[in-house]
Amino acid sequence: MIEEVAKAGADPAWKAAAYQVAEQDYRSYWMHADAKSAGFASVRNDRNPVYHFIEEVGGNRYCDVHLNHATAEQADRMVREILPQFEQPWGLANTEAVHKQPFKQWDYPNGWPNLHWLVLDGMWRYGYTQEVRRIAEKWLSLNCTIRERTGDFWEKYDVVAGEVGKSAVYPTQSGFGWTLGVFVAMVQEFMR
């Protein structure tokens, strides 16, 4: 990312500021992971509904892998150390099991199609094909199982129990476009 900002044909002052922000953000993502793995407490900001995924869980590292901005070592660390915390019988939970109260729709035990795509597509690009196929098979199987039972695809799924996702604000939506889109993309990209 830093290199892309540096190559941008923008005003020099804007480019310098963007470079500084990009470098600071990039370093803080990985420094945060180092601090967390060393046992240091992190500051929580529960105002953001996907906070736990982005700040606490490793979503920022998933984004770096998805966008091809992580080093090979960082991608490997994400797959070895972060991914196992979220892999469940039917796919990837968005948050750790300990983050349950107050429940928000993005929380454990829910898994969302868009975040499955972000994680798996990034891992695929870094050569983790075996791991991607394992998780994709779980997710696709869950989608098929629920569709056979209900006749529809859903916006999110409970990846622990293998059910339609739990909801906090509104009823879980059926016939969801991104679920079908991710399903088709996973079959086309990862299951050939």
Image (cartoon, rainbow, N blue to C red):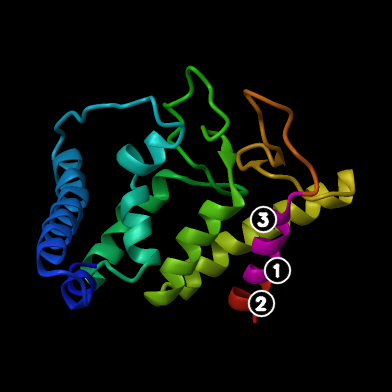
In the displayed structure image, the side of residue 172 where residue 98 appears, left or right: left
The range drawn in magenta is 176-186
Circle 3 SS class:
helix
Is disc 2 surrounded by few (<14), some (14 to 19) or many (20+) residues within 10 Å?
A: few
Dot 2 corresponds to which residue? 188
Q: Are marks 1 and 2 in contact (CB under 8 Å)?
A: yes
- Main secondary structure along the magenta-highlighted residues: helix
Circle 1 SS class:
helix
Residue 3 in the image, given as x and y percentages of width and height: 18, 74
Dot 3 corresponds to which residue? 178
Q: Is residue 99 magenta?
A: no
Label 3 or label 1, whichever comes before in sequence order: 3
Label 2 or label 3, whichever comes before in sequence order: 3
Can residue 79 be seen? Answer: no
Does residue 130 sit above or below 163 in this rendering?
A: below
Residue 173 in the image, given as x and y percentages of width and height: 75, 38
